[in-house]
């Protein structure tokens, strides 16, 4: 080190010093190059005009050798320029040729590393945001597709159910009516007016029932699509629009009601209509109590009336298609239905249904 007692006095001498370029400062008529090695540094200053080009390899981080005159300050002995304590060491080359590049600056400088790191983080952030947006859109597309498939499946099942109802129930009713009309014609040809009148009366009753059932199907579809989303709300909504149910049908519910699929609500509404219709038409009931119980994943629908009842052990009388219709509807949903009735003590209909995840 130069700043040690007894060090050689090099002030004003031609010296050769090596180090790494730390800074380059070009002024109008002077070029200053800060060169360092560890804790030591010196300044190579030369009268090199700013318009004079520097070597291409003379850049920050390059290792250089500077040949020039050494100057430093202060000195304790101005006569002998003793180097006991000094600062501002300068090596002044006569021209730019006095600065020789020994090795180029490394490509990966701290500034470049920070720049590449920042750019990489920026690209990674953009990719992450783009992937998150793409994932969100993909999930939305999948949810929409699942909803569409569920809606299509529900519509398909409802079409099959309607087709079965219209084809089986109404075709049987109309076929039976045509048979009775034909029988009445034959009896009239044979002069049996009483028998013909009886057959025509039965045909008229069958046509009236067919008309009622058809109106019920069409009305139920309208109520299912236009009524409230909740099952209890849909039942009350329907009851308010059935004038002959007023002051007779009472609807209550218990438990936390989930949101059911429209197809499920519509089928249960059809069962309710059929059960109440049977209670009023065949049971001559004056009171029908409807209760819906929601318990976990299960639904229990109870319909009890104070009508005349019937003997469940005996075959269903001809023309009573409603019981079979209710059984088919609940079986289609995967549930069960039971009838408890005693002559003179009314009828109780119990519907049990386990709710699937797609119906909740």
Image (tube, helix red, strand yellow):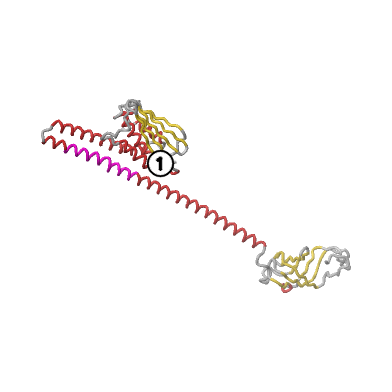
Q: Do we see residue 50 in this rendering?
A: yes
Q: Element type at marker 1? A: loop
Judging depth in this view, the residue of 350 and 140 nearest the camera is 350
Indicate the quadrant where residue 48 lies.
Answer: bottom right
Q: Which residue: 41% across, 31% down?
A: 291
Which residue extends farthest bottom?
97
Quadrant into which the C terminus falls = top left
Q: Residues within 10 Å of mark 1 (few under 14, many from 20)?
A: some
Residue located beneath label 1 in the image: 261
Image position of 56 (left or right of 210): right
Indicate the quadrant where residue 284 lies.
Answer: top left
Quadrant into which the N terminus falls = bottom right
Name the dominant secondary structure of the magenta segment: helix
Q: Do we see residue 225 in this rendering?
A: no
Judging depth in this view, the residue of 152 and 343 nearest the camera is 343
Where in the figure is residue 92, as x and y percent of width and height?
77, 70
Magenta residues (range): 158-182
Where in the figure is residue 109, as x and y percent of width and height?
67, 64
Indicate the quadrant where residue 335 lies.
Answer: top left
Q: Is residue 77 above or below residue 357?
A: below
Q: Which residue: 30% across, 33% down?
A: 314
Q: Is residue 282 above or below residue 357?
A: above
Where in the figure is residue 153, as x and y percent of width and height?
38, 47
């Amino acid at each position: 080190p130069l700043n040690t007692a007894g060090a050689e006095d090099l002030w004003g001498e031609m010296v050769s010093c090596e180090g790494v370029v730390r800074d380059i400062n070009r002024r109008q008529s002077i070029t200053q190059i800060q060169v360092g090695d560890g804790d030591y540094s010196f300044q190579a200053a030369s009268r090199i005009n700013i318009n004079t080009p520097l070597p291409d390899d003379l850049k920050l981080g390059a290792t250089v050798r500077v040949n020039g005159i050494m100057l430093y300050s202060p000195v304790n002995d101005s006569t002998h320029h003793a180097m006991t304590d000094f600062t501002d060491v300068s090596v002044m080359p006569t021209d730019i040729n006095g600065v020789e590049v020994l090795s180029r600056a490394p490509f990966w400088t701290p500034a470049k590393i920070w720049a590449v790191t920042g750019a990489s983080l920026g690209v990674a952030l953009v990719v992450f945001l783009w992937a998150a947006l793409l994932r969100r859109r993909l999930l939305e597309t999948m949810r929409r597709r699942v909803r569409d498939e569920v809606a299509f499946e529900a519509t398909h099942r409802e079409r099959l159910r309607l087709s079965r109802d219209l084809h089986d129930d109404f075709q049987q009713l109309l076929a039976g009516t045509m048979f009775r009309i034909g029988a009445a014609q034959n009896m009239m040809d044979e002069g049996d007016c009483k028998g013909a009148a009886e057959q025509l009366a039965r045909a008229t009753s069958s046509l009236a029932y067919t008309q009622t059932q058809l109106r019920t199907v069409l009305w139920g579809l309208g109520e299912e699509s236009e009524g409230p989303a909740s099952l209890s709300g849909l039942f009350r909504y329907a009851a308010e629009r059935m004038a002959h149910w007023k002051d007779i049908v009472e609807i209550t519910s218990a438990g936390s009601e989930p949101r059911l699929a429209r197809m499920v609500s519509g089928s249960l509404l059809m069962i309710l209509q059929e059960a109440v219709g049977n209670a009023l038409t065949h049971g001559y009931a004056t009171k029908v109590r409807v209760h819906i119980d929601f318990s976990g994943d299960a639904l229990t629908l109870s319909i009890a009336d104070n009508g005349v009842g019937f003997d469940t052990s005996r075959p269903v009388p001809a023309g009573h298609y409603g019981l079979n219709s209710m059984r088919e509807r609940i079986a289609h949903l995967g549930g069960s239905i039971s009838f408890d009735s005693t002559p003179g003590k009314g009828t109780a209909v119990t519907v049990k249904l386990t709710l699937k995840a797609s119906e909740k």
